[in-house]
Image (cartoon, grey):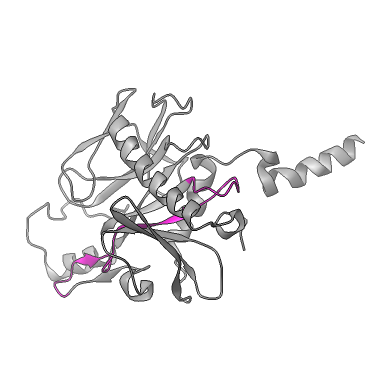
Amino acid sequence: MKLIAGILLFFCLPAALCGQQETILTFYHYADSCTVFAATDKIPEIICRHMVGQFYVTLIGFKGEDIARIAAITAAPITDPAKDISLILDFDRSGHPSTGKVSTWGYIFDRNRDGKVDYVALLGGAGPFEGADMPPTFPRRGQPLSRDEMEYYLGHCKMIFNHIADDNFDGKVDAAVNVDLDSSRDWVKRRILVRSSGFNGVFDDVRGFNGDLTDVYDSIPSRPTAVPYRPVGKPPGNIDAAYFREKTSILHMINEAVARCKIKPEQLAGRKRR
């Protein structure tokens, strides 16, 4: 009996985490891989669209499937997601990284299969990421770039996604991973995990990382209710209660559209969906 129990445990742990619900700690890398390895061989198509408040919330999947994988929130309706939404990085005529015509969208997931979105990888822009090979003499913000430096810059540009999660499935965002820019250059220096493990608004799990979420890049000076960071396209600010309220409102809009569209649990993307 002990041998059988041991075999069952062995197969249970990697396959289903023994019935435990996934948190941002266990799901982040899977969601991140979906943003990095975009399904460029598939054709996006609209599954359903509804107005929520003053905005159109469009649920998008891929042709031949019936799974909502993307949600876009726009002031005007999207008519052709294949043209309006770019799943991969592009560059404009001046050589700057571009996210395409519509930039207010994200990959959506239902981790516990209850028919509600509880994890979103939101498009946050596009830009260069610092790496281990970053030259210490690389020009700072506003300084001109040589041809070689421009090639280096272009080669390090990526789509930027910020992740939000409702880890206790009560409809409110309580964990996030957000990029943090270098103070002297508009490059992504690291990502910051901010999490309230007690779901009480107290941030007791804060870490900076690059690559693996468990590979701590450095410590983050923070308070229990506010974590300073430098976002893309905005002045420095804090990841705080206001930040989480804003992200929760986005989550509510998406789930309102999911409900109005009568999307079934099996029609929402997740780790084990086909």
| Quarter of the figure with residue 204 | top left
How many numbered discs?
0
Q: Residue furthest left?
A: 143
Magenta residue span: 93-118
Front residue of this view, candidates 14 and 203 = 203
In the rendered image, which quarter contains the N terminus? top right
In the rendered image, which quarter contains the C terminus? bottom right
Where does the image place residue 176, in percent across and percent down from the top left?
Answer: 39, 40
Residue 67 left/right relative to 140: right
Where does the image place residue 216, in percent across and percent down from the top left?
Answer: 41, 38
Q: Is residue 98 magenta?
A: yes
Q: Is residue 224 above or below residue 107?
A: above
Residue 47 left/right relative to 131: right
Give the main secondary structure of the magenta stretch.
loop
Q: Which residue is located at x 49 percent, y 41 percent? A: 24
Q: Which residue is located at x 33 percent, y 44 percent? A: 178
